[in-house]
Image (tube, grey):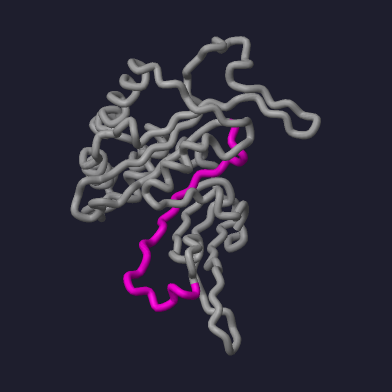
């Protein structure tokens, strides 16, 4: 979370750089990280996966490993709400989560648009929040894609609304092979391309966000919430999302677009 997800967040939230030069891009990323509010313990959920039996198969828990102490408090899951205190993102919650032994392996950015004030179609939407807002999804891996989830009118004489996806699935759109992430990274390293590599002040700004929280978790000996192997993570993560009126993408009924 501190490394990969925070870098994705910084790239997404940064202002337009002066140019595509590596230093200009990294300057903007550092500005985002330095504008972020310190993480609070009440805005963080940690978890640890436990054993789970599915059919005839038993999946081991984290502490079932012979190299792990039975009373280990090491988290295997974390969810956090972050805030960027600048003019563009003031008051907008950024929710991140990452974990091991979850129900699927996916990395994506989801932009959930706010409700429209005085929405004329509110009676048609009812209280279903999944139908109330449009959503932009950028799937980083696997199956790279960009799609926009919109509410549209169903053809016919009545007034009924449905949800559809405007989908750009890269593998379906382009026949050429998409390079693996590490293939691209190694090529950039060979060619001296630094745009995707972090700078020392960027690394310092990232750790300055998480280090106080990690120390507090260790000092208070906060026990991670247990969640079954192969599940969507601890229940506390869903309460955290509900606190800020946000939906996690993996509970909206879509497993593959």
Q: Residue furthest bottom?
A: 157
Horizontal side, residue 97 vs residue 64: left or right:
left
- The residue depicted at 54 percent of the width and 66 percent of the height is 165
Query: Principal SS element in the magenta part?
Result: loop
Q: Percent position (x, y) of residue 178?
A: 56, 50
The magenta span reads 101-124
Q: Percent position (x, y) of residue 13?
A: 31, 50
Q: Nearer the viewer, residue 10 or 73?
A: 73
Q: Is residue 232 magenta?
A: no
- The residue depicted at 25 percent of the width and 45 percent of the height is 84
- For the C terminus, the quadrant is bottom right
Relative to 216, is 146 above or below? below
Relative to 211, is 248 above or below? below
- The residue depicted at 56 percent of the width and 72 percent of the height is 162
Q: Is residue 105 magenta?
A: yes
Q: Is residue 108 visible?
A: yes
Relative to 46, is 10 above or below? below
Q: Total of numbered circles in the picture?
A: 0
Q: Percent position (x, y) of residue 96?
A: 41, 41
Q: Is residue 148 visible?
A: no
Q: Nearer the viewer, residue 66 or 19?
A: 66
Relative to 121, is 39 above or below? above
Q: Residue furthest left?
A: 87
- The residue depicted at 43 percent of the width and 46 percent of the height is 241
Q: Percent position (x, y) of residue 208?
A: 26, 28
- For the N terminus, the quadrant is top left
């Amino acid at each position: 979370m501190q490394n990969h997800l925070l870098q994705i967040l910084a790239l997404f939230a940064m202002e337009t750089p002066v140019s595509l030069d590596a230093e200009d891009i990294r300057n903007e990323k550092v500005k985002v990280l330095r504008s972020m509010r310190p993480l609070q313990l009440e805005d963080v959920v940690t978890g640890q996966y436990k054993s789970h039996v599915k059919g005839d198969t038993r999946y081991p828990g984290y502490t079932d490993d012979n190299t792990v102490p039975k009373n280990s408090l090491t988290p295997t899951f974390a969810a956090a709400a972050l805030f960027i205190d600048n003019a563009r993102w003031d008051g907008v919650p950024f929710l991140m989560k990452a974990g091991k032994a979850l129900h699927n392996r996916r990395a994506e950015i989801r932009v959930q648009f706010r409700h429209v004030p005085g929405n004329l179609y509110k009676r048609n939407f009812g209280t279903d929040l999944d139908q109330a807002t449009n959503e932009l999804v950028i799937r980083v891996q696997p199956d790279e894609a960009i799609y926009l989830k919109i509410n549209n009118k169903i053809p016919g004489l009545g007034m009924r609304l449905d949800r559809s996806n405007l989908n750009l699935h890269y593998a379906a759109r382009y026949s050429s092979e998409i390079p693996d992430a590490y293939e691209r990274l190694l090529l950039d390293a060979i060619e001296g391309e630094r745009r995707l590599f972090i700078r020392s002040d960027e690394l310092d700004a990232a750790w300055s966000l998480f280090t106080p929280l990690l120390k507090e978790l260790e000092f208070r000996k906060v026990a991670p919430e247990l969640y079954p192997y192969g599940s969507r993570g601890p229940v506390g993560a869903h309460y955290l999302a509900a606190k800020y009126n946000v939906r996690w993408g993996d509970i909206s009924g879509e497993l593959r677009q």
